[in-house]
Image (cartoon, rainbow, N blue to C red):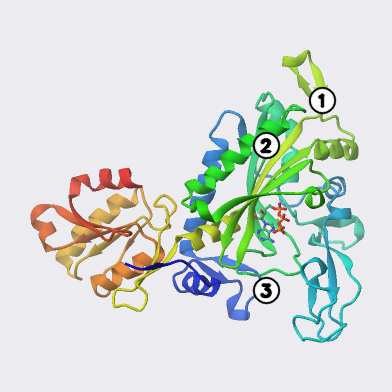
Amino acid sequence: MSEQNLLNMSDLVSLCKRRGFIFQSSEIYGGLGSCWDYGPLGIELKNNIKNSWWRSMTYREDVEGVDASILMHPTTWKASGHIDNFSDPLVDCKACKSRFRADQIDLKAACPNCAEKDSFTEPREFNLMFQTFMGPVQDSASVVYLRPETAQGIFVNFLNVQSTMRKKLPFGIAQIGKAFRNEITPGNFIFRTREFEQMEMQYFVKPGTQKESMESWKEIRYNWHLNNGLRAEKLRFHPHGEGELAHYADAALDIEYEFPIGWGEMEGIHSRTDFDLKQHQEFSGKNLHYVDQLDGNNKYLPYVIETSVGCDRSLLAILCDAYRLENKGQEDERVVMKFKPSLAPIKVAVLPLVKKEKLDTPAKKLLADLQQDYKCEYDVAGSIGKRYRRQDEIGTPFCITFDFDSLEDNAVTIRDRDSMKQERISLDKVKEYLKQKI
Ligand code: ATP
């Protein structure tokens, strides 16, 4: 058997559209640049990824979850440095009016869009935050921002969570939510968009212990990606050098994945010192000190290790990694999405061999039973071979065929997506079989 990985993003984009994973936003109006809608299978996959993250990050003694509001007091963004620093250098081509990030092109070369020479304006700083207005009056006093990261909703709730949950250091606060950035050059499908979801955790530690905490989170986070089924040879760490460090960090590294477009950041792990709490303390005038009862009631601002992973980027990596083209050009060619079963959008397809009431009624009964635990599909249309191919392409790990023998022997055939091997399993053992495998 021959096997080929995903080589072009366009193959994935078309599969995602054809099979109901991801559609262009507002498609009937011609689409909206770099905005995407998750379809029925996409949202299942996304929810499974979020659940996997939420379970691994918050089902532990030292981490609690929150869900903060997207709109925050505007001073938050003054304190965090986003109003003054969250910008990219922008240049325009005077000839074709295209815009580029100055740090992503050669300013001495011709315009990559229209090939005009010496056509770029001087770089100027372009703030990436989306602004809007709160209330009916559009004056500068009512300006609010769509949050460009979820982290600040955690920092401003540090004491609320610490005191209500009676937390002792070290402890973390986790959150999943939307973030917005008016990116100059979005693209590559859902890799860089202007509206996306982040899964972030801030871990508050005693100053001086941040290095060991960072080491431990680095391992935990790498293993989470491995556990989602990503291949180790497509994952690597990229530590930030001095020049790359953000203004708030004393150390940082990225977890990168090798996408078909090359290596790209999936997750950032940052040692943010006490920068954020200190800033919020200063701008709010509220005392945010932690009282360390285990250290003679010593009062201090904790240091922070942040883990920040893009939900959509992680989903893109999982899609790219799962994609396999088997036996290309041959009669038995097939595309299979080899998702880890627990992440697969559809876990089980129930397929009566032919469309006959005699099979339909008991097969539907099996479906109803399995649906209590799993997202299932029921398909009677077309040949069984075609139905298998469709399930392979959406990554369904198990297909259950209900045939005429099933009426006699109370057993069904379960086909494994990856090996395509078929097993005859008695109906009363099906649930146990699936539970073990999923
Ligand atoms: P990049 O260098 O790619 O712009 P960043 O270093 O600004 O990313 P962070 O601010 O550390 O990214 O955000 C954490 C994570 O959020 C990233 O690792 C990425 O997975 C995700 N992310 C950031 N910007 C976007 C975006 N425009 N679209 C989709 N995901 C994003």
In the image, is residue 74 above or below residue 40?
above
Which mark, by number, is residue 214? 2
Residue 117 lies, in percent from the top left, at 84, 85
Which is more N-terminal, label 1 or label 2? 2
Side of 369 relative to 10 (left or right):
left
For the residues labelled 2 and 1, the Cα–Cα distance comes to: 20 Å
In the image, what residue type sits under mark 3?
Answer: Gly
Where residue 424 appears, as percent x and y from the top left, is: 17, 54
Mark number, residue 123:
none
Q: Residue at (81%, 79%) from the top-left corner? A: 109
Mark 1 Cα within 10 Å, few/some/many (few <14, many 20+)?
some
Residue at which label 1 appears:
300
Alpha-carbon span between mark 3 and mark 2: 37 Å
Q: Relative to 247, say whether 182 is above or below.
A: below
Q: Within 10 Å of the Cα at label 2, are there few (<14), some (14-19), or many (20+) other Cα atoms?
A: many
Asked where in the image residue 365 lies, by quadrant, the reply is bottom left
Does residue 156 appear anywhere in the picture? no
The nearer-to-camera label among 3 and 2 is: 2
- Quadrant location of the N terminus in the rendered image: bottom left
Judged from the image, the quadrant occupied by ligand 1 is bottom right
What residue is shown with label 3?
33
Q: Amino acid at mark 1?
A: Tyr
Q: CA distance from mark 1 to mark 3?
A: 46 Å
